[in-house]
Amino acid sequence: MVSLYSMDEMEGVSPSSTAAPIPERRARSPEQQTESSPPSKQHCEHQARSPRRPQEGKRSQRRQDDHEQMLEESERQRLPDQHLPDQSGLVSDTAENSPKRRAHFLHGPYPATHFGPKACILPNPTSVMHIQDPASQRLTWNKPPANVLVIRKIRDESLVEPFKELCRFLVEEKGMMVYVERRVVDDATLSQDETFGSIRDQLCTFREGYDDISDCIDLIICLGGDGTLLYASSLFQGSVPPVMAFHLGSLGFLTPFKFESYKTEVAKVFEGNAAITLRSRLKVKVVKDLLQRAHQQQEHNGLLPPSHSTSEAGKVTLQLQVLNEVVVDRGPSSYLSNVDLYLDGRLITSVQGDGVIVSTPTGSTAYAAAAGASMIHPNVPAIMVTPICPHSLSFRPIVVPAGVELMITLSPDARNTAWVSFDGRKRQEIQHGDCIKITTSCYPVPSICCHDLVYDWFESLAQCLHWNVRKRQARLADDLSDDSDTEN
């Protein structure tokens, strides 16, 4: 399995990730004093109590849009001329004779190579045909990491002690600034533990949806199951810091590390040069078009002739990054779901059944696998489309290239509305005139590997899904032979 992105070219379009200087919390070694210092405790409390205003969220969104535009401009400059020949057989350079093309590569946009303020991919000077060996995907640090986000599975008392051990190790032995969610610190078990009080007072807290921590986190450590990694992905709608996930949950397909050796494993990651898997995400937009909805309602009432055209206008009500899948289903209705699927603006098919799943390779081992799809290695640049109980036996799951734009709309003759969810969250209703636009995001999730990206994936298949596990066939005895061998 290979990732079809050139490291030489990705370095040219990597965004510069620099964090603003922040006050010093405690005395540090001379090496750490030369780097950007983590925020003080007072600054952390002020940040948690005084969330950023909506204007700052808009500025962050504008920065992300500017970065994506910069990537597209760089891709235009790096792509060879792709003009179609005119009638005379010569290549025309004029804009009038050349078709309009999207500014992305065949296998999707270049992913960001910087993850958080200080982490990036180890440069690889050797590449053949823009194909990078997955084994060369190594993590390195531009500067030593200082701020660590620890995500703990909520409502699991068995994780309290591992959480305290990890925080004590990071704060006292490594001198890190540790960020945790407010509701984790407010846990009654931690509040009653007097021995943990000194560590708890040094933790920085935040609240999801109120505090923006995307510019100050160098490393993410997850304690729990696969849901913790999905939650970590949802916190970062732009560049995602490296994620180190410890298996302390029920499944653990995305969590390769064991907590028994956490000190050794965390120390290795801080030193850098660790193998990573770039888990692609989906960039999703939900567009509400009230005008188109009213037009279709008039068609339904017989006031206007039928029209199957989709409106380009509309209001974007939701835009987010999805790690596993986007699920469109029939919701509580007893009727079949009837939605139209477009690929790059062209109608491909209508999905009639219980719904459809649009997933990443990471999500191929989740809901899509239960619906009958193939399991794809996360390093493969692709988008999977899997029907849920289709009303046609020939409707099989398909795989399309990463970078294409999928659009899902409610069919004009659909008897009921549809419902959509994103990684199992933010479920909402889709009505006539609404559409869901899906494409590959340029902000993948860099998941740190325990061994390497090939061994970890197949180990997860065997341990979590029991892939190809069966009772072994007994070998034949040496003195026995097949009767067919003795026949003349």
Image (cartoon, grey):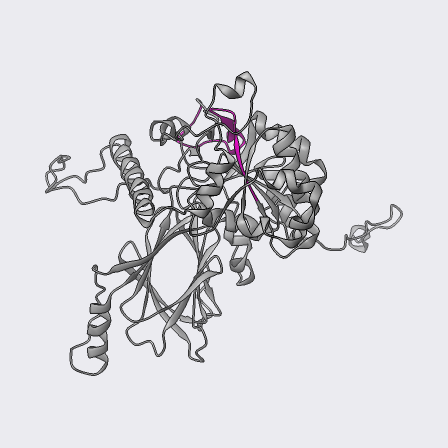
Extent of the magenta region = 126-150
> Which is more toward the observer, 479 or 270?
270
* Residue 276 placement (x, y as % from top left): 53, 35
> Which is more toward the observer, 19 or 264?
19
> Which is more toward the observer, 477 or 60?
60
Q: Is residue 148 magenta?
A: yes
Q: Which residue is drawn at the image coordinates 53% and 63% (left, top)?
A: 371
Q: Is residue 481 left or right of residue 283?
A: right
> Which is more toward the observer, 114 or 202?
202
Q: Which residue is drawn at the image coordinates 63% and 35% (left, top)?
A: 451
The count of marks equals 0
- The answer, for residue 258, to whether it is visible in the render is no
Q: Which residue is drawn at the image coordinates 25% and 35% (left, top)?
A: 73
* Residue 45 placement (x, y as % from top left): 49, 42
Residue 94 vertical placement versus 333 (above, below): above
Residue 91 vertical placement versus 303 (above, below): above
Q: Is residue 447 magenta?
A: no
Which of the 4 quarters of the picture holds residue 457? top right
Q: Is residue 311 left or right of residue 40?
A: left
Residue 29 vertical placement versus 402 (above, below): above
